[in-house]
Amino acid sequence: MCVNYRPPLPEQLDMVLGTLVDLYRDWDWPSETWKDEVWKDYIAPIVRAGAGGERKLQLASYGMVPRRHIPPGVKPFDTMNARAESLGEKRSFAPAWRRAQLCAVPMTCFYEPCYESGRAERFGIGMADDSVFFVAGLWREWSEADGSIAAAFTQITINADDHPLMRRFHKPDDEKRALVVLPPNDVDAWLHCRDPELARSFLRAYPAQAMKAWVAPRAPAAKAAVQTPPGQQNLELF
């Protein structure tokens, strides 16, 4: 399961989407809109389908059920990843799946542990050509304590026991899982799909030969505070 990844810089999104991503023009955004690496409950960009067919960039919290929305007394649980096999069954994901609230999560790489050396080593995984890519995801809205509306998202995973690259990661006896990387030509079709059963046709493995992996030790850093999301704000890409 992927619980840590690197989102693109605004300039990289500009290049891959062919549009201007101007985060500072009309909105009061923090000086650092999102972190270099994303972890549970961090704010990160996602792309959704706009009402007019355009792509919309939105900031959302990583994890379909943010920690602050887990009721008191309930044991904390993680919702950064949604298994494709049970999307229509799990309470955290089923409503968004049935309503086809699909999103694409842009990233430059994600991180997984590899045990081939006999101990856990952090690897980065990305495209062979170092390009920005999009992962299939779901999104939903939450009402915040201050009356604002914020978004949260999850990434969809599939079995990767037979994937030439992704089967290398996680503990030897663990089931191997992989994020659903969307081929570039499928991103818009995924975003505009409104039939959950048709959406399942997008949930397939990405070719290993188009990917690469490398040792990527985590840089030492002070513990970052969990970000509180701003009220929901969409950025129309134009």
Image (cartoon, helix red, strand yellow):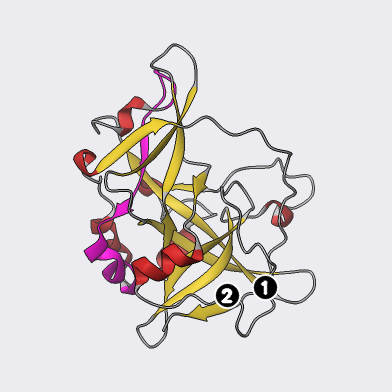
Crowd class of label 2 (few under 14; some 14 to 19; many from 20; radius 10 Å): some
Q: Is residue 54 above or below residue 174?
A: below
Q: Which residue is mark 2?
A: 23
Q: Are marks 1 and 2 in contact (CB under 8 Å)?
A: yes
Residue 141 versus residue 29: which sits nearer the camera?
29
Q: Secondary structure at mark 1?
A: loop
Residue 125 is covered by the magenta coloring: no
Marks 1 and 2, the one that precedes in the sequence: 2
- The range drawn in magenta is 170-192
Residue 29, disc: 1
Q: Is residue 10 above or below residue 108?
A: below
Drawn side of residue 23 relative to residue 119, left or right:
right
Q: Position of residue 78 (x, y in %)?
A: 59, 44
What residue is rendered at 57% in x and 51% in y?
36
Residue 203, disc: none
Residue type, label 1: Trp
Residue type, label 2: Leu
Image quarter in which the C terminus is found: bottom left
Q: Position of residue 136 (x, y in %)?
A: 37, 57
Drawn side of residue 202 relative to residue 179, left or right:
left
What residue is rendered at 49% in x and 14% in y?
119
Q: Secondary structure at mark 2?
A: loop
Residue 230 versus residue 193: which sits nearer the camera?
230
Drawn side of residue 227 relative to residue 82, left or right:
right
